[in-house]
Amino acid sequence: MPIERIAGGEAINRLRTEGRRVRWPDQREPERRMDGLVTVTSKPGFQIRPGDRIFTMGSCFARNIERRLAEIGFATVMYDEGLLEELQALGHDLGYMNKYNSASIRAEMGWALGTPRPPEEHVVLPLGEGAHDLFAYPGTKFVQSTDNVRAARRIIESRAARIRDCRIVILTLGLAEVWYDSVSGLHINAAPPKSAIAAEPDRFFLDVYSYEEIVADLEAIHQLLQSHGHPDVHMLITVSPVPMSMTFRALDAMAANGYSKAVQRAAIEAFVCAHGNVDYFPSFEPITLTDRRISFEVDNRHVQPGIVSQIVDRFMGIYAPDAQFELSAEPLRESAPATAKDLAVAGKLHQEQRKFNAAIDFYSRAIESHGDGSLEASKLTVPHLRAKLAGCLYKADRLDDARGTLVAVMSDSDSSPRDLMAVARLAEIIGAESLKQEALDRLGATEVTQKIRVPAERKRAS
């Protein structure tokens, strides 16, 4: 059945009464809504009052929204400096709060609003000598101490519990690729650690969510809020413009991302049409329709801060017309081309995530681009990057390339003791004895030989 049925007379009348906004923008007209940050208009179904508390949950774009709301003086219970300090004390940043799909948002909000919590081991997964929170985003720290994971989980739960006092609930949906844990019967927040999949290959599954599944999650969230939330709760939903970093499907990532965003957007439209206290605010459309060099950072995924500020300012201008705040004056700018430092940082990130082939590409490009001066400004050196590159080549089973890269480190007069030590360690692992000895001779420190030895049974595991 249709998500909305409009009488023919009313449909035609809207062409006369709604103005240019119901027609696709024409660049020959004076408004020129496609210039700069594209303007997509909307009509609010409710208003945000100055004293309202705002609950936000979703992907990394939700963190962007929270920060701007806090900057202009609104109470956002899922973000403040105190939260940042709590997370940093545990070695995390605000990204740890990210929720990437409708299922994990539904679960976290349900627990906050009284749905029985599953056993701890269904959320905090024991893994090796530590643990992993299946409903948090760990960044590169997939396995941490169990105490650390439990402490971080308490932070998430204590913040989420404040939803009962929030009249405004803002959700941003991110992904339609959702991982399922067959032991708990729960859909989790993000891909589990590779070590967990290797240990139990039949436990976790990737589900590509359908329109119906997303609508069901949103309806469950709405029912929870109606039953246990603020008595005058209103929901505002967006689709995150941040594309997926990768797909686990046998598709081009851009095609997979197109499905992911489209199916979530379609589900939200049906959900909004069904409820008078739910609005969709278009943040996805203006950002993705705007020139990507203006709207996105150099990684082509994350939205530039100035764009986020302007989007939130537009939203608050519509939903909180009585609020007094200074509009963002941050100018729109084109993202700068990737520097050698940018590429090196990306290489390190992919290496920490054990994506060694991607790390090889980034480190190689950083070395090729080193003449732009950005490495010197960051105290990085070409020999150091080559040593990192050699380690990734080894992990990718490209031993001949790893040896050749180690030789390049040794031939560079700027190689530091740290770089030479890295050469000696890796040469020991791959059995390049002459390279190891040469590195030790240049170090002039044969007493470090014992430090670089790796027990044979640990060579591959390391």
Image (tube, rainbow, N blue to C red):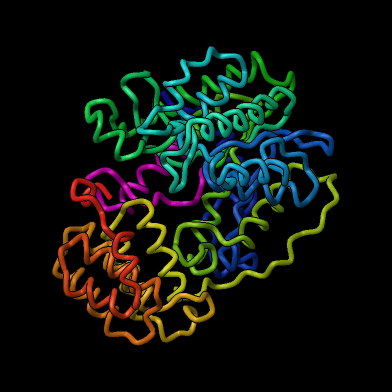
Whether residue 41 is in magenta: the answer is no
**116 sits left or right of 54 in the view:** left
> Which sits in the foreground, 316 or 68?
68
Q: Quadrant of residue 86?
A: top right
Residue drawn at 47 percent across, 78 percent down: 375
Q: Is residue 170 left or right of residue 24?
A: right
Is residue 193 or residue 56 the one in the foreground? 193
- 235 vs 165, nearest the viewer: 165
Which image quarter holds the N terminus? top left
Residue 364, percent from left and from top: 30, 73
| Quadrant in the rendering for residue 200 | top left
Q: Residue furthest front?
A: 447
Residue 260 belongs to magenta span: yes
Q: What segment carries the magenta color?
A: 239-267
Count of marks overlaid on the render = 0
Kindly tell me whether residue 372 is visible in this rendering. yes
Q: Is residue 24 above or below residue 444?
A: above
Percent position of residue 212, x then y: 39, 25
Q: Residue at x 47, y 42 (%)?
A: 138
Q: Nearer the viewer, residue 151 or 273?
A: 151
Q: Is residue 267 visible?
A: no
Residue 54 pos. (x, y %): 71, 35
Task: Please indicate whether residue 343 sits to the left or right of residue 435 in the image.
Answer: right
* Position of 444 relative to 327 (above/below): below
Say whether residue 74 is left or right of residue 246: right
The structure residue drawn at horizontal position 41% and vertical position 41%, both measured from the top left corner, is 142
Image point 62% across, 69% down: which residue? Answer: 332
Percent coordinates x, y for residue 144 in the rendering: 46, 38
The quarter of the displayed image where residue 322 is located: top right
